[in-house]
Amino acid sequence: MPQSLESKESKNLELARKVLIISSIVVLVGLAVVLVWFSLQILFLMFGGILLAIFIRGIATWTSRKTGLSRKWAISLVILAIVAFVLLFSALFGMRIYEQVLKLMQELPGSFEQFREMLKGDQIGQLLLKSGPDFGNLLQKSIRNASSFFSSVSGIVFSILFIFFLGIYLAYDPDLYVGGILQLFPSSKRPHIEQALKSVGFILHWWLIGRLFSMAVIGLFTGIGLWVLGMPLAFTLGVFAGIISFIPYLGPILSFVPVALLAATIGWNMVLYVLILYLIIQMLESYILTPIVLQRTVMVPPLLTLTAQVLFGMAAGVVGIMFALPVTATLIVLIKFFYVQDVLGEEIDIKGVG
C-alpha cells in the first residue's frame, strides 16, 4: 500500500513537472510573439540595413574585381560614393524640393476644392459626390498625417541613420553575423542553410538594383513628361514618383493622386493627359523593366504582394509597406528551400543556387 501511494505521488509529480514545462514553453512562445509584434518596425528597419549591406557588398565586389582593390577598400569607396551622391543631390536640389513640397502641401486643399466644384458642374460628378465617401475629410486627414510625418524629423532621421550604420557594419563583416546564425544549427545542416542564405542575398541584391533602376527611370520620365505637359512642380512630383515607386502597385497610385488634383485645377484635359502619361510609364515598368529584374530574382504574385503590404502595413506602418515585397520574396525562397525541397522532396529552381 505505501508503495502504491509512493508510485501514485511520483506519477503526480511527473505530471506536474510536464505541465509546468509545457506551460513555461507556451508562456515563453507567447512572450516572444508579443515581443516580435511590438518590435516589428525595428525588425523591418533591420531588414532595410541588410538590404543596404547587400547592395554595398555587391557593388564593392564588382569594384574589387575591376580595380584590384581589397574588399575592405572597395566597400569604403562605395560608401564614400553613396555619401557624396546624397550630399551633392541635397546641395543641388534639396532646398528646391523642400520649397516645392511646402508649396504642394499648401495648394492641395485648394486643388481639391476646385476639383469638387468641377464635379458639381457635371451630372456624373454630382452622382459621385453623393454616393462616394467624404473625400474632403479623407484628404484633410491625409494632409494632417503627412504633415505630422514630415514634422517628426527625429524619427525619420533615426530610421535613416539606423539603416545606414547597420548596413555599414554588415557590409564590412557579414561573416560574423552569418556565422552566428549558422552556429544555432547542427553542423550537418549548416552548408544547406548557408546556401539558402546566399541565395537570398543574391536575389535581394539584384532585386534592389532593379528596383533602384526602375525608380530612376520612373522619376525621370514622370518629371520630363509633366514638364512637357506644363504641369506645375514637375520636378518635385517626378522625384516623389521615383521615390514612392519603391513600393510596388501602391506607389504609383499614391504618386498619381497629388498630380491629378493639381491637373484638375487646369482642366479635365490635363487630368486625361496626366493619366495617359502615368499609364504609359506603368506599362514601361510592367512590360520592360520588371521582366528584366525577374531574370535574376523571384516572381512574387501581385495578390500576394498586396496582401503582404496590407498585413505588414497594419503591423509596422509605412516601414512595413516599404519592405513588404523584399521580405515576402525572402520568405518565398526560404519556404522553397526548407519545405518544398527538404520536406516534400521536390526540385526547386531559384536564382543563385548551384
Image (cartoon, grey):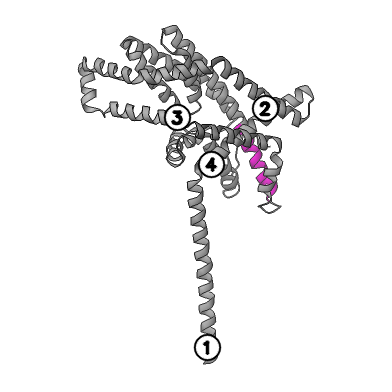
For mark 1, give the secondary structure: helix
Q: CA distance from mark 2 to mark 1?
A: 74 Å
Distance, label 4 to label 1, CA atoms, is 57 Å
**Percent position of residue 88, x then y:** 61, 18
Image point (31%, 10%), residue name: 267
Look at discs 2 and 1 and give the one toward the viewer.
Answer: 2
Cα–Cα gap, marks 4 and 2:
23 Å
Q: Mark 4 against mark 1, which lies toward the viewer?
A: 4
180 to 24, vertically: above or below: above
Q: Nearer the viewer, residue 286 or 160?
A: 160
Q: Is residue 27 above or below residue 180?
A: below
| Residue with the mark numbered 1 | 4
Query: Which residue in the structure is indicated by mark 3?
Result: 151
Type of amino acid under label 2: Ile
Provide the residue designation for mark 2. Answer: 79
Measured along the vertical axis of the image, is residue 268 above or below residue 289? above
The Cα–Cα distance between marks 3 and 1, rounded to whole angstroms, is 74 Å
At label 3, counting other C-alpha atoms closer than 10 Å, the crowd grade (few under 14, some 14-19, many 20 or more) is few
Depth-wise, is mark 3 or mark 1 nearer the camera?
3
- Say which residue appears at 67% left-offset and 41% top-offset: 195
